[in-house]
Image (spheres, rainbow, N blue to C red):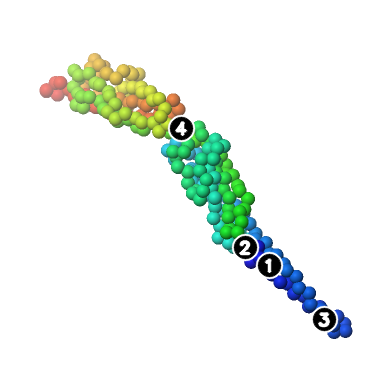
Amino acid sequence: AENQTAINTVTATDADGETAVSSALISVDNQLPVISSLSLSPSSPLTTDGLTAVAAASDGDGHSISFQYQWMVNSSSVQNGSSNVLSANLFVKNDSVYVRVTPFDGYGNGIAVDSTTVLVGNSAPTMPTVVVTPSNPDETQDLTCSIAVASTDADNDTLSSSFDWLLEGNSTGITSAVLSAAQTASAENWSCEVTISDGTDSTIGADSVTIQSTDSDGD
């Protein structure tokens, strides 16, 4: 029992056989729940990640425990209630996030505990779709590298792009979008890599072609 009263009765008998009875009311207090562990997942979130609080607690009376979650972003409360999940749309890159959790056993609140603070990291741009044309070039044709599907960035960062032409997998240092036919020869394999950067992280998309011979005799 907890936060209840009970009657404690004591009967005493002396050497002459005389007895006395005494009764008293005793208050039995509830033992408040105690949080034993609290963590956030993921521990290194990006702007596209929702955050989940994982809490555990114990209760000396064996009561069922529920939790109240107060989510803090840059020290300001953005969500307070029974949900242990914080949606990614409530924070942005470089925000500091933690959660304050209070346990409740149905009779009283335990001491609130704060999680460690996590810093929201940068989300890299998505990979671009790169196309080299023509797809079956001969040695008289220039090659053009273009972005068919552009990259996007969850942080809305400004994106930059750079080109690199590779011959047989090795960078040539040619960084223009167009590769002159004068640079190529029959049977060579050329790839164009396009690097998209948001200033912090980058992704690379690529396409490749093999130069065909214009010699109908195959010489």
Q: Which mark is residue 61?
A: 2
Residue 58: x, y in percent?
Answer: 60, 57
**Sequence-wise first label, 4 or 1:** 1
51 on left or right of 58: left
Q: What is the quadrant of the N terminus in the image?
A: bottom right
Residue occupying the point 67% across, 61% down = 29
Amino acid marked by disc 3:
Thr
Give residue 199's quadrant in the image: top left
Residue at numbered disc 3: 19
Q: Nearer the viewer, residue 210 or 102?
A: 102
What x and y, as percent, mark residue 198?
A: 41, 27
Residue at x 56%, y 57% (from the top left corner): 65
Residue drawn at x 69%, y 70% as measured from the top left: 6
- Amino acid type assigned to the residue bearing label 4 in the image: Asn
Please, what is the three-letter code of the amino acid marked with disc 2? Asp
What amino acid is found at the position of numbered circle 1 in the picture?
Thr
Circle 4 Cα neighbour tier, 10 Å, few/some/many (<14 / 14–19 / ≥20): many
Give me the C-alpha separation between circle 3 and circle 4: 81 Å
Give above or below for 117 relative to 59.
above
Q: Name the residue that disc number 4 marks.
A: 122
Answer yes or no: do the residues labelled 3 and 2 have beta carbons within 8 Å? Answer: no
